Amino acid sequence: SCAGMALSVLVILLLSMLYEAVKMGKAMLLRRALLALPRSLSQESLAEPEEGGTGPAQGSPSLMGFPIFFHRWFQYHVGQTLFHVVQVVLGYMVMLAVMSYNAWIFLGAIAGSTLGYFV
């Protein structure tokens, strides 16, 4: 029926838009993850202990901050992994719909991808 076809095209359009939104969310999360990492290791934490000294103090910020950065990076990485899984599932769903070789479904996927990227 015409209503069923229109609903199918609308669903594919929305899935394609959601796919683009997830792709952008994944890119933003990657940017945040990269900003969460320290720019470089502190020279203080790499230095060998000097004579008569014990080396970097156990309470120094360079040694205490690393696990915090790692924990934050790990949380972002888990988030990126979940975004990736959602992106792959949505991509395969849209691909299977397009493989029906229906021109209206194909146009719905193209229009949804275009609108999703634009928004």
Image: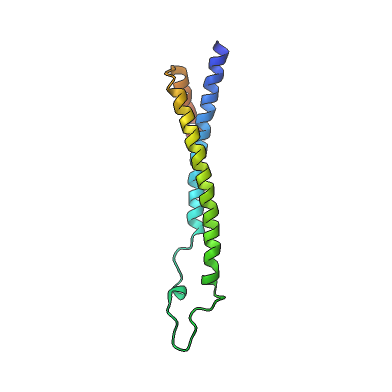
**Residue 1 vs residue 91: left or right?**
right
Residue at the (48%, 23%) spot, across then down: 108
Q: Provide residue 94's location: percent of width, then percent of height.
A: 47, 28
Query: Closer to the camera, 119 or 25?
Result: 25
Q: In this view, does 27 lie above or below 38?
A: above
For the image, the number of numbered tags is 0
Q: Using the image, determine if residue 77 lies above or below residue 100.
A: below
Q: Position of residue 112 (x, y in %)?
A: 49, 28
The residue that appears at 55% across and 53% down in the rendered structure is 75
Residue positioned most to the top: 1
Residue sitting farthest toward the bottom: 52
Asked whether residue 52 is in view, the answer is yes
Residue 6, image quadrant:
top right
Residue at the spot 48% in from the left edge and 40% down from the top edge = 23
Query: In the rendered view, would you say 82 is above or below 35?
Result: above
Q: Which of 105 and 56 is in front in this view?
A: 56
Quarter occupied by residue 48: bottom left
Q: Which of 61 and 75 is in front in this view?
A: 75
Residue shown at the point (50%, 40%) measured from the top left: 85
* Residue 118 appearing in the image: no
Quarter of the image for the N terminus: give it.
top right
Q: In the rendered view, would you say 107 is above or below 43?
A: above
Q: How is the image coloured?
A: rainbow
- Residue 52 image point, x, y percent: 47, 89
